[in-house]
Amino acid sequence: MLLATDLDGTFLGGDSEARLSLYQTIAAHPDIELAYISGRSLEAILPLLSDPTLPQPDYIVADVGASLYLGDSLQPIQPLQNEIDSRWPGESRIASAMQRFPDVVRQDEPQLRRCSYYCPPERATDEALVALARELDCEMLYSAERYLDFLPKGVNKGSSLRKLVEWLGIDEEEVLVAGDTMNDLAMLTAGFKSVCVGGSEPKLLERTQNQTRVMHAENTGCAGIIEAFAHFGFLGAHGVAAENRRDETQTGKAELVMVYHRLPYEEYRVDGKIQRRRPTSPNGIIPTLLSFFADQRGSWIAWSIYEEEDEEKFVTHTSVDAKQYPLLTAARVPLTKVQVDTFYKRFSKEAFWPTLHTFWERAHFREDDWEVYCEVNRAFAERTAEEAAEGALIWIHDYNLWMVPAYLREMRPDLRIAFFHHTYFPSADVFNVLPWRREIIGSLLQCDYVAFHIPRQVENFVDVARGVVPLTTLSRQGCAPRFLTYGCAVGLETMTTAVDTGSRVVRLGAHPVGLDLNRIRNALDQEGASSRMAELRQEFEGVKLILSVERLDYTKGILEKLQAYELLLDENPELRGKVTLVSICVPAAREMTIYNELQTQIEQTIGHINGRFADVGWTPVQFYFRGFPFEEVVAWYAMADVMWITPLRDGLNLVAKEFAATQGMTQGCGVLVLSEFAGAAAELKGAILTNPHDLHDLARTCYLALNLPRAEAEARLRQLNDIVSYNDIRRWGDEFIAAIQGQEPEGTESPANPTTDLV
């Protein structure tokens, strides 16, 4: 069958339960074809195509019948469109003629092959207007006591639907038409089985009163369409009720569900059997997220790689820590190694990572990889839907799981969905490069709460979303004093905190991730840290230590920093033999071959600098291409005179915070030089900000840091340490949860941020 339906008040109307029932019926029956028949233009319909909860149409008849498109490609349906085009006198001719009627005002909305006006009822029957329509050889249509449309001669929703049905070769007995206003009259009376949904325009009901094939439903919107399914016997004698009577939603028991790509423990194989251990890669976020399960029932959703021979005995549920978190279950999503390598190590890192960090020219987009990505995200959503209790809180993490909200909202509309974006979120002109931007944004807008590190990323998201759906801003708030406003490249004065998409309110927030300060204290208390500090103190006696710690990645600005260091030594020869740059660079995973060329360039540049400037007993650059134990890293932090962190783009940067905290705990006076394109730059007042795209500025600010008076260095460090100590990882988690629940966090004042607001 073909369901040909108006949108506003009809297919988009009715209560949420009826909409879900109808939409799921259509999704479950591939033999039901769907046609949107709308007064909107295609441009105004596009936002609906980004809504993952709506069934996507097979055909679109837009502009009150003047435009016909295929639903998948959005290309005109030919030769039907050519025939309509030949009858259209042109927008400029109609607009010019209508200047005689200044009280009839043109609608400021997208229009194609039609001209639409706001017209008072008394003017709609004016003989002069009727005569003008004849003169222009146009159809004139008036509806809802307000809207006047000029259309090509003989064109309306009914005539275009009739031609579409004939072109498709569908039996007219297999067509159901639904509408609610006078501009639906032509299609409701075109000879098909039809329904005027509840709440239809009185004139429409009057004009269709004696039409034997037109049903007047009692219920509004989708519920009225469901009535019509039963009345006309579509899908059996009882229609949707018989075919789509769903059992009560099977809910789980988890009140809080954490959806994270990693398990809160590590899995490894011994003799083919899966064993588990504490994470060897330090991650302060995981212990914080775990802490929320101390006194409430919850699930942690993450992938687990299985081998084909293990599929039948794969265990989906395990405990995490039965003693410390007795109410927490790890719900494992089984993925093959191929799926993980494709969705995470290749696609996420080669398509999304470079785009998010504004290196779109490095991105590689593959449609088959996107299909695997969606397949994995759906698997996460299905497991989440199974675990969550009625009305549970779902907390989804980062861009690897962008599509989970879309699938989850369709499965479980009762859930509260929150999303935290850990990586940078770029401006619209960059993000819109992604071929799947509409699907991604449509998914994120299914959330109740979406948060980023800093206000700039929030506003970038809002700008991108405005290009996908028409948003109404509901609230804004100032960014100061928590964040810099005009003081850095990522600063912002005000940020949006809530938007209305037309179907839901989405709240927004900025929550920079904090540190697990106990982890740093514990590392400093290790015997190895103290001895290593003593060794470094002796090794660099009489030499100022410039420290750089980062992963191997083109976003980190490593090559640019080395070039700036060469410039620093060039322009300031007195520094030779007096400073050393120590670069600790953590390698990428072996499978990520995209970084091989960068590694070669870095090694060549270091060789060039050392070959040019090295002297007996002094090496300008010491490069460590490996990860260090954390207690050794904090020893380097404690001994550094200058911490030089210069990413070209970064969502936040926790290394900067680790340095500030370590220096504070060891009574140091090291100076932080930080890229103003790192998210942390908007938060860490006290850092010397630098532009990593300007080699001269990089060299200048590094020189300034090396020569900063001790009193100023100590004052800057106190300011940094106050911010980092107060806004720790626990406060980040508490404020995020409080924001989702619409609560004010406790104790929002600090020495560095006297009126810190939850944003």
Image: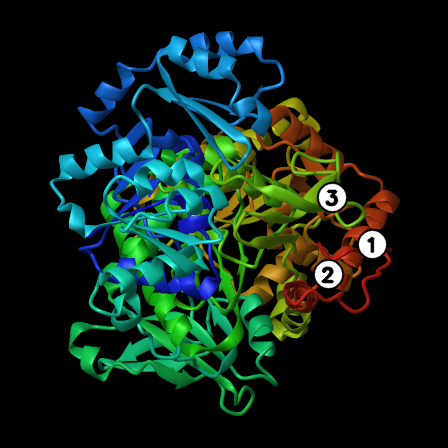
Specify which label sits upstream in the sequence, 3 or 2.
Answer: 3
Describe the element under mark 1 as helix, strand or loop: loop
Specify which label sits upstream in the sequence, 1 or 2.
Answer: 2
Describe the element under mark 2 as helix, strand or loop: loop
**Residue 359: image location, x then y, percent:** 44, 35
Describe the element under mark 3 as helix, strand or loop: loop
Circle 3 is placed at which residue position? 687
At 70% from the left and 47% from the top, the residue drawn is 475
Relative side of 210 to 545, left or right: left
Q: Residues within 10 Å of mark 1 (few under 14, many from 20)?
A: some
Task: State the CA–CA distance, disc 1 to disc 3.
Answer: 16 Å
Task: State the CA–CA distance, disc 1 to disc 2.
Answer: 10 Å
In the displayed structure, would residue 604 be above or below residue 632? above
Circle 2 is placed at which residue position? 727
Q: Amino acid at mark 3?
A: Ala
Asked whether residue 404 is in view, the answer is no
Question: Marks 1 and 2: CB-CB under 8 Å?
Answer: yes
Closest to the observer, 148 or 755 = 148
Q: Amino acid at mark 2?
A: Asn
Q: Nearer the viewer, mark 3 or mark 2?
A: 2
Q: Nearer the viewer, mark 1 or mark 3?
A: 1
Residue that extends furthest to the bottom in the rendered view of this protein: 323
Relative side of 127 to 643, left or right: left
Give the quarter of the image for residue 219: bottom left
Closest to the observer, 238 or 721 = 238
User: Quarter of the image containing the C terminus?
Assistant: bottom right
Q: Which mark is residue 753?
A: 1
Task: State the CA–CA distance, disc 3 to disc 2.
Answer: 16 Å
